[in-house]
Amino acid sequence: MNRLAGKVALVTGAGRGIGAAIARAFAAEGAAVVLAELDGATAAAMARDIANACAGARTLAVQTDVTQPASLRAAVEEAQRAFGPVDVLVNNAGINVFADPLTMTDEDWRRCFAVDLDGVWNGCRAVLPGMVERRAGSIINIASTHAFQIIPGCFPYPVAKHGVIGLTRALGIEYAPQNVRVNAIAPGYIETQLTHDWWNAQPDPQAARKATLELPPMKRIGRPEEVAMTAVFLASDEAPFINASCITIDGGRTALHHE
């Protein structure tokens, strides 16, 4: 299929996990994809994998630090030189920072917000001028169910993710007259390497995995590809009137009051 044919997409944190799945799905749907990733070698390897798997795929790896506005502006400029103006931005890069509020260091607070909220704004600010000028564009911010459901012991991560939803809604409304859509995706538990790392860090990894799989009503957790296909939809011309919204991908967990 070619649902994104002719579009140029930039995906942050595209070296692995959800970001890599989105980059792969975009390429399969005909987009030229820029993988903007802090680890340049990881991004380059994933770009090669995608190019080898998708005949005719156009990919570009760009070492990018989302905490630095200049780095994201440079990534957008590289994308434009290689493929043309950026039509789609996916702000996927993020980190987990979980701490006790009263013992957390100032450094941890700043690190969480620098990546998980400021990084999203830096990406938006880098692409918005061009999108506004062309009166077209789709921005997709990867939020989390932490944006509206609180798990004890995860502070300050949910605070940053609440901010991502607020940013999404505010920018979506601000630039709706220019036909620039800004939406969010809120994944629940998704089987990424980070999830496996968390399981393996528990005293009983198998028990931790089993407990996680029991949480969603569907009795499984999501796959990165399932998040990616929602991103394809929001990036495509199939969603022209979806704006300032958030799509939750959690198998129904957040709709469940209690077991």
Image: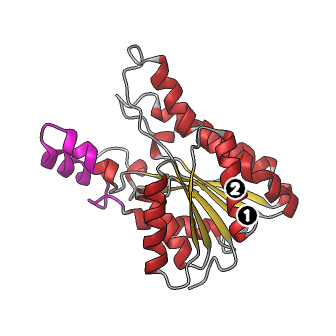
Give the residue displayed 74% in from the left and 53% down from the top: 127
Residue 6: image location, x then y, percent: 70, 78
Specify whether residue 215 is painted magenta.
Answer: yes
The answer to which of 2 and 250 lies nearer the viewer is: 2
Q: Which residue is mark 1?
A: 80
* Disc 1 secondary structure class: helix
* Disc 2 secondary structure class: helix
Q: Is residue 29 left or right of residue 209?
A: right
The answer to which of 6 and 218 lies nearer the viewer is: 6
Q: Is residue 164 left or right of residue 186?
A: right
Query: How many other residues sit within 10 Å of disc 1, few (<14), some (14-19) or many (≥20)?
Result: some
Q: Is residue 259 left or right of residue 142?
A: left
| Residue 183 sits in quarter | bottom right
Give the residue displayed 69% in from the left and 50% down from the top: 74
Asked if the residues shown at circle 1 and circle 2 are in contact, with their CB atoms under 8 angstroms apart, the answer is yes
Query: How many other residues sit within 10 Å of disc 2, few (<14), some (14-19) or many (≥20)?
Result: many
Q: Which residue is mark 2?
A: 76
Amino acid carrying mark 1 in the image: Gln
The answer to whether residue 148 of the structure is visible from this angle is no
In the image, which residues are magenta?
196-222
Query: As displayed, is residue 27 above or below residue 191?
Result: below
Numbered circles on residues, count? 2
Residue 92: image location, x then y, percent: 53, 52
The answer to which of 125 and 98 lies nearer the viewer is: 125
Q: Residue furthest front?
A: 41
Residue 121: image location, x then y, percent: 66, 42
The answer to whether residue 75 of the structure is visible from this angle is yes
Residue 153: image location, x then y, percent: 34, 28
Amino acid carrying mark 2 in the image: Val
Structural distance between the alpha carbons of marks 1 and 2: 6 Å
Specify whether residue 181 is painted magenta.
Answer: no
